[in-house]
Image (cartoon, coloured by chain):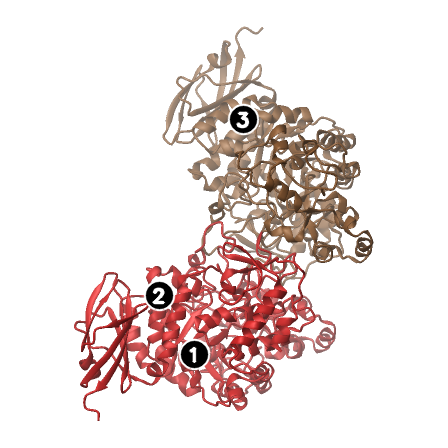
Chain colours: A red, B brown
Amino acid sequence: MVFEMLSSVKSKGRMDYCLPKVWLEGWYRGPSRVEGEKVFVDPAVFYSYLRKWLEENKIFDAKVGESLSLQRGESSREWIKRAVLYSSLVRTNSAYNHKGFGRFEQDDVLGYRESGTFLKMTALLPHLKKLGVNTLYLLPITESSDVFKKGEVGSPYAVKDFLRIDRRYHDPLLEGWHLEDEFKAFVQACHMVGIRVVLDFIPRTAARDCNLILSHPEWFYWVKLEALSSYAPPKIEKLGFCQPTFEQMRDLYDLPNVRAHLDKFSQDPSKLNPQKWHNFVKDCREENLIYEIAKHFGVITAPGFSDWVNDPQPTWDDVTFLRLYLDHPITARGKVGEEQPPYVLFDVIKASRFPGEKSNSELWEYIASILPQFQKKYGVDGVRLDMGHALPAELQQMIMSNARRIDPAFVFIAEELEPHRAAEAAKAGYDVVVGNSWWMLPRFPDKTYEFFQTLSCNMVLPFLAAAETPDTPRVAVRREAQRLKYLLPFLCAFSKNGVMTLNCGQEIEETQPMNLGLDNDACGRFTLGCDDEFQGKLAFFDHYVLHWHRTDLIDFLSELIGIRNQFLDLITDGQYKPVYLSWQDGTICNASYWTHDTALIVLANLKTTASNVSVLLDRTLGEEIEVEKVHSWDGAGWKQENVSMKLDCELPQLGFKLYILKFRRVNEV
Amino acid sequence: MVFEMLSSVKSKGRMDYCLPKVWLEGWYRGPSRVEGEKVFVDPAVFYSYLRKWLEENKIFDAKVGESLSLQRGESSREWIKRAVLYSSLVRTNSAYNHKGFGRFEQDDVLGYRESGTFLKMTALLPHLKKLGVNTLYLLPITESSDVFKKGEVGSPYAVKDFLRIDRRYHDPLLEGWHLEDEFKAFVQACHMVGIRVVLDFIPRTAARDCNLILSHPEWFYWVKLEALSSYAPPKIEKLGFCQPTFEQMRDLYDLPNVRAHLDKFSQDPSKLNPQKWHNFVKDCREENLIYEIAKHFGVITAPGFSDWVNDPQPTWDDVTFLRLYLDHPITARGKVGEEQPPYVLFDVIKASRFPGEKSNSELWEYIASILPQFQKKYGVDGVRLDMGHALPAELQQMIMSNARRIDPAFVFIAEELEPHRAAEAAKAGYDVVVGNSWWMLPRFPDKTYEFFQTLSCNMVLPFLAAAETPDTPRVAVRREAQRLKYLLPFLCAFSKNGVMTLNCGQEIEETQPMNLGLDNDACGRFTLGCDDEFQGKLAFFDHYVLHWHRTDLIDFLSELIGIRNQFLDLITDGQYKPVYLSWQDGTICNASYWTHDTALIVLANLKTTASNVSVLLDRTLGEEIEVEKVHSWDGAGWKQENVSMKLDCELPQLGFKLYILKFRRVNEV
């Protein structure tokens, strides 16, 4: 299917399709006109070369609609430990000003869609393969809502339709093609070159105008229109910023402002006026749905908010919670009557801890049926589950077992940031947690050291080892960014339990964050020059094009990941040992991995001054060995080292070094 | 008509229409709920009170479709000298988050249009009357284009249809109303309270997808699609940044890059394939017009650029020039052949200096017919002519005489920034020039002094006396803004030949500019807090809401303009004299205006330290007088002063003082 897709692009006989030169590097050999970092090609010629590349680099005859594991007959989920993940928001990742002049436009006068499409994501595969990526983690690709949007375009996390792919991902170069087929072909292409595709799945919330409202208004919470301007999580004076206990939660119901909050809710419109609703549903056009309901019924779906009491973040205006229980939560027993319409409060949100008694089984069935459809249609390989911690355990199980019944190798990534909760996530069936490396690693020396030496080693599940994520500041704007951009990926590549993770744009030293969700503040939004057209734009809410340009970092990451892959067995299955150094003050990160005859030794200097340190090999392993060969790598090529039991190492400021030893165990026969 | 309009707003029985409290101040007495600077009302009740206000404050039974002067039987254009202008972009000026929570949206879930409308502009009249405004200068209100837009919404200067008002100015509160009637009613309301309405008229350029293309493709310049990415004004190495002479212009035609530029142009699509064009026009939907032409004919209207050689500004991608001559300019004689398609070059743009021989009379007739339609339909009172200096004198004359044939008091404001060109503008028939007070006045002490003492006094035409304009930085971000915000309006109010001019938002100390066109740089775009949703937004290209809040500045301006109006005859017709001071070092701005028994003396200290200075009255007038009474005003109320021939004045840093004298001329009988 993908070959067909790539051959469908028609030539207009003009070389006017502008692309970043980086995308074409190393594989495109057709005619082009180069202008700095831009290159102009004929799109038909370009995609015919991409087809050629795919034919030549195909390692596997992938078919459509089955995961890579299924096609390979593998049932283990261990692949995630060997993954090199690349987080990608398709809209942003493959966006570019294809006309090559003027400003970015979603659709331009030459007929090109400048925002991201699956066709263009396919064109990024050579770049991703060069980096060594083998798993693509796609932020939500489902139809996103334009209602209550926070910028120029809707957030991908405001899901209007859980089953439909966002129509803007269609590429007009593929005349006559259907969007679903474009995504099928894209996943097929990924599988062909050994790249798995992991999606984002958001079962706790939906867009305020989710299409399910028409068929199931009772799956949503509704507030009266006149209460909307004062709608907010009630402030709880006697509590701080916390997650309430059962008793605290029950007490909240006696507070006047909590009562006032409950009064803002309404029955769903079908109950307010069944006959009117019946007629309304018949005539309603889906895109205008929420405005029409507001106009005719005076109610609207309730804005979301955090399950933490006194959370300083504002209401989540672009999403609403799904109603997981048909009755009030157990905490409300005796506190609210039957006449109280369904409402949103901290307990309702945290349905995992404060369930009701009557589960909304029809909705649960629906939610648990979503992933199987993506698996069967497109062959996706895994998901990250958004806010899974707020889901009832039973629903979580339904989702997982449904998916794994189809594909036992289907991976679930938990949106769990706290390392110590990895055990719970493991128990719930997750394969990997997000973790907090993106927060710890940039805070050198203390947090970096703590994370690399202790936290990561004690993780019960693998975690995403990331210098940055779509929610965090870019590593390129961190303190000492010019060194951290190398150092942090190095630490990610060789950390115990780490799943090496890159974020789209990280490889080209992008400074503009994609979202301000984690570890950032409002000013972190302004990292670009004043005259940059994307200054202040966030990928989650606005159109924004990565600042594509050739960087040495691409080569560095490519080499680093190559080395990681070469020694992957050693890292995942070798014996882990902290390194015994000649001295230690908590600023030399270290790790070593051992098999019977090979060892990998990892050193990194977290100081902004150079350090000399020696590795004591026998003390590290705790066993007598005979060293046969030592090679080292510091980001600038391999070097043969003197054979010795004591490796003397000079580490520049924020520098690092990798040693590969060939050795013989003295007591072995 | 306006009373009917205000009565048409229907109640929904909810007080959920959120407005800035400032808008309601002093006249709204209906029910409301106040929240800080916001107030919630029922829109029907609100507009019924507005109707009441209009009935009570009506000074004139204005009818629809005639200028104020015509209705009053006045034929003089002298009214502009007595004007207090308020520059307004309706989209921005009356924009507000009417739901009162979340973020701004053009149209919100409560059914309110949050971007500006004429209905809401009508609701701003009490505020404008309070300020003392008597002339509203509206930036373009015509249908603006969404093609090649530079932000979220099209620039008002990219005119898609010269005759149609932008549909987004309709207010959905006026169900069943037509936009044209809303504008008629608004102008009528303005006239009722003695406010004239002046529009912006842009006859030199049009939007790239102007609706005239379908009927008259030959009125536009066309470039080949493949040339678009390299399309730019040719760089002229041997010349600097200049407007070329006739001979220089002719020489340009011999340069290879100018030749290459000319090669980019094409005949218009109707000539490329008359039959295809004929069929195309029959089927084409206007909104998609330019994409469809590009697709089917491979050509597109040419982007605009400056008439200055080597101008550093980029091409004006959202507009294209109208083809004023059917042949090439006189400068091209013998340089380009008949086969050369119509093209855009510095001479073509500056059609006033480098005309062709065959004027495009059909187009000229069309252009000159536009204003009469606005006059007859809506009764507008004047226009600012955009880029008038680039129009052939004859066309300019046609425009003016057509307008003045209908209304001899119809005023033309010249977009002429250079004071010394006011004479030419006067000769061409303009009544007032924009001038450069906005540039000179904030540059204290030198430029402020030079402007107030010399430039303004020698102007051949009145000029707009403005501390800021829609194109410039706000006075609230200038150096010493907290003082300049009072001082500059004071100087504007009492400058010789000045037409007192305010910019929407100036009265509430808005910091965010509306455009970066003049005296600003790219960083001037970021004046707001990082978490302000309008940070980086420009009113010309984005939705942006003024930061409405109560300020003392409103009261100050109101009082200042009241005083100006009280002594207007003195200022416009009195005898002007510089003030004879006890000492002078170029930092005490001064002016005085004299009749036979009254004088106005204006002093302002341009230093950042206090100054003591004395006014020598007889030396100032050059005649012996007997002072009878002296009152002074310094922004904090009137004060009676000692009667003396020497006024001792203490001026705080950047402070000012006004004296009113009653006197008797000693030698008069």
Label 2 with label 1: CB-CB less than 8 Å:
no
Q: Closest to the observer: B639 or B251? A: B251
Q: Chain of mark 1?
A: A
The residue labelled by disc 3 is: B495
In this orientation, does residue B203 appear? yes
Q: Nearer the viewer, residue A3 or B127?
A: A3
Q: Amino acid at mark 2?
A: Tyr
Expressed as whole percent of the image width and height from the top left, the position of residue B49 reads 66, 49
Q: Quick check: can you spot residue A343?
A: no
Specify the farthest residue to the bottom: A669
Which amino acid, by three-letter code, is at mark 1?
Answer: Ala
Residue under circle 1?
A83
Report whether A528 appears left or right of A440: right
- Image quarter in which the C terminus of chain A is found: bottom left
- Check disc 1 and report its element: helix, strand or loop: loop
Question: Percent position (x, y) of residue B224?
Answer: 68, 50
Q: In the image, A339: left or right of A584?
A: right
Residue A513 sits above or below residue B131 on the image: below
Chain containing mark 3:
B
Q: Residues within 10 Å of mark 1 (few under 14, many from 20)?
A: many
